[in-house]
């Protein structure tokens, strides 16, 4: 009998000097996402990242040549307070629709027009042997921590 061992979620929390509506809009626009964080290998280069604004919508990237590469799906779309995404990218950082981790981002108002952004990336064990590698990648300083710094810069610009 095989036992699945749960892997701890990756959690990040930060304050951004904008209201929740603006934080949600900037986050979901993905204009701040670095082009090198892409599933495309070589050509084409990433042109944009898209989240279709509805439950069941696609989460994907577009290449400069028009090709698309899925990343996952929208599980909850609740502006301006919450976004829940199914991340269907495995520990080799390849699209894998056989399983999904979840990325939940909440946007809560704080004093002085600020917003508390909480991100939780969970259920890495769903990818079996590659789950630990996926967790390590998103927990790395170049993972969610570095990405959220780029988000804050874009939101506060």
Image (cartoon, rainbow, N blue to C red):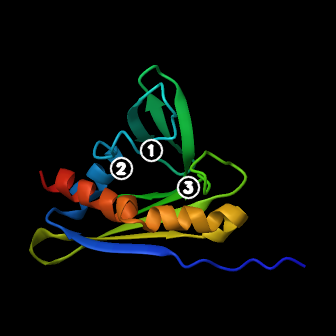
How many numbered callouts? Answer: 3
Q: Residues within 10 Å of mark 3 (few under 14, many from 20)?
A: many
Q: Secondary structure at mark 1?
A: strand
Q: Secondary structure at mark 2?
A: helix
The quarter holding residue 156 reads bottom left
Q: Residues within 10 Å of mark 1 (few under 14, many from 20)?
A: many
Mark 1 or 3, nearer chain start = 1
Residue occupying the point 12% across, 69% down: 113
Residue 145 appears left or right of 93: left
101 over 97 or under it: above or below: below
- The nearer-to-camera label among 1 and 3 is 3
Residue occupying the point 48% across, 29% down: 42
Residue occupying the point 40% across, 60% down: 143
What residue sits right under mark 3 in the picture? 87
Q: Is residue 80 visible?
A: no
Residue 84 appears left or right of 25: right
CB atoms of marks 2 and 3 within 8 Å: no
Residue occupying the point 47% across, 25% down: 44
Question: Residue 131 in the image: x percent, y percent?
Answer: 63, 65
Q: Secondary structure at mark 3?
A: strand
Q: Is residue 14 visible?
A: yes
What residue sits right under mark 1 in the picture? 51
What residue sits right under mark 2 in the picture? 28
Mark 2 → mark 3, Cα distance in angstroms: 15 Å
CB atoms of marks 2 and 1 within 8 Å: yes
Question: Residue 47 in the image: x percent, y percent?
Answer: 38, 30
Residue 43 appears left or right of 36: right
Question: Residue 68 in the image: x percent, y percent?
Answer: 53, 30
Foreground residue, 138 or 58?
A: 138
């Amino acid at each position: 009998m095989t036992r699945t061992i749960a892997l701890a979620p990756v959690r990040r929390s930060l304050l951004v000097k904008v209201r929740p509506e603006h934080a949600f809009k900037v986050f979901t626009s993905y204009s701040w996402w670095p082009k090198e964080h892409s599933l495309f290998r070589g050509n084409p280069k990433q042109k944009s990242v898209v989240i279709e604004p509805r439950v069941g919508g696609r989460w994907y990237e577009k290449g400069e040549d028009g090709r698309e590469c899925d990343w996952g799906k929208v599980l909850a779309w609740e502006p301006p307070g919450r976004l829940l995404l199914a991340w269907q990218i495995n520990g080799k950082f390849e699209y894998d629709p056989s399983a999904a981790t979840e990325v939940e981002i909440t946007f809560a108002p704080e004093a002085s027009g600020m917003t508390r952004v909480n991100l939780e990336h969970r259920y890495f064990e769903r990818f079996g042997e590659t789950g630990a590698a996926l967790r390590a990648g998103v927990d790395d300083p170049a993972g969610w921590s570095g990405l959220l710094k780029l988000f804050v810069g874009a939101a506060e610009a």
